[in-house]
Image: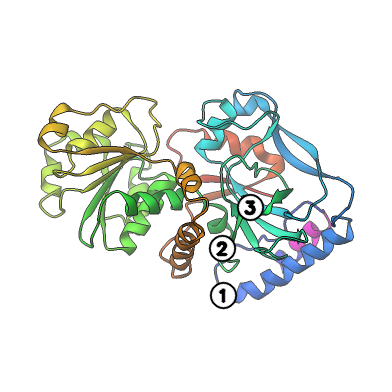
Amino acid sequence: MKVKLLIRSLLKKAWVCGLTTHTSLPTAFPYQRALQCRIVGELSARGYSTGSSAKGCAALVYRTHGDPAQVVQLESMNLPSIDEKSVLVKILAAPVNPSDINMIQGTYAILPDLPAVGGNEGVALVLEVGSQVKSLKPGDWVIPRDAGLGTWRAAAVLAEKDVISLPNDIPLLSAATLGVNPCTAYRMLSDFEDLKPGDSVIQNAANSGVGQAVIQIAAARGIQTINVVRDRPDLTQLTDRLKALGGSHVIKEETLRRPELKELFKICPRPKLALNGVGGKSATELLRNLQVGGTMVTYGGMSKQPVTVPVSALIFKNVKVRGFWVTQWKRQYAKDEEALHGMLEELCVMIRQGKLSAPACSEVGLTDFHKALDSAMQPFTSVKQVLIM
């Protein structure tokens, strides 16, 4: 009853999402689909249709690069009319990722023109489609195909080619966080080493969104994971949570340099693959523990320190040092619909089977965005901030 009252209240506000139930129980989805239809009707009644005049939409905008707490502002921006190849969408939920913060700071590899709307990831509900749109229909869920779309807003008119559909029978938070971290984990586990059941992978930043996805996807494939985390006050709770996700072993950074690691390799094979999201000394230690001919893939650099490769690892162990950026992969395979759809479908199957869950999330309303930005930039965070529109 409380949920229905909340939904009724939210539907009175044209730009607030009514999808407040995040349960994955199948019985919830008929009600969810009916609610989507109500949202479509609600917004259509307010004039959001083909050829309508621009309407106001709440958005988190930055007009200059800098400290997100200082430069991001909640503003009202106009929505254009949809054309024959575009779609009107209601953004449902959008996470705050490290790449979003870096983009606002002006330090990311790609930067949108200013002023810009923050956010590179999220899930939206299609409300209306242009006359020549073939791949989408009202009621579909969509996620961005590429970075820089600007998802921290209540609604948007987007080109059909800029989004890709997702099944709407998965939990909302899983859909909102699917396009970046799980895709990064999936590709790194698939594209660099021929991993078989029983093999092992070592990773730092194991409590990150990518790290949690790596644990779950690897476990589903029968691959062991050695998960490296920094020491912290809640280490026991974090260790228990990562093991509950399917992590085989959880160790502290310091253990990488201690003799007890040799004991671990008596029950677990040396890893073929190392996944580095930190850089600095942590990356060097991952390299030292690879098996001969193994590969280290760097996808992030949270320490802001360079990766130092020991000469002995290159000469005597023939390790390979690679980099990965999921945005580049998506651009490379932009015309290969099967590659992207196939990956997303496999991930969605895992979600339905209970083998892949969203990372721990804190849901924050758009007007409380300062809280979300501040929390996302705190050290030792294992909780992803998700803006609920």
At 20% from the left edge and 44% from the top edge, which residue is drawn? 294
Task: List the residue tagged with mark 3.
Answer: 161
**Residue type for callout 3:** Lys
SS state under label 1: helix
Please tell me the numbered disc located at residue 26: 1
**Residue type for callout 1:** Pro
Question: In the rendered image, is residue 193 in sight?
Answer: yes
SS state under label 2: loop
Residue 268 is inside the magenta segment: no
Please tell me whether the stretch drawn in magenta is mainly helix, strand or loop: helix
**Circle 1 crowding by C-alpha within 10 Å: few under 14, some 14–19, many from 20:** few
At 77% from the left edge and 62% from the top edge, which residue is drawn? 39
The answer for how far apart the CA atoms under marks 2 and 3 are is: 24 Å
At 11% from the left edge and 47% from the top edge, which residue is drawn? 263
SS state under label 3: helix
**Residue type for callout 2:** Pro
Is residue 129 rendered to the left or right of residue 102?
Answer: right
- Asked which quadrant contains residue 231, the reply is top left
Please tell me the numbered disc located at residue 205: none
Which stretch is magenta?
A: 6-13
Q: Whole-percent x and y of residue 114?
A: 68, 28
The answer for how far apart the CA atoms under marks 1 and 3 are is: 30 Å
Q: Whole-percent x and y of residue 57?
A: 79, 44
Quarter of the image with the N terminus is: bottom right
Q: Nearer the viewer, residue 20 or 291?
A: 291
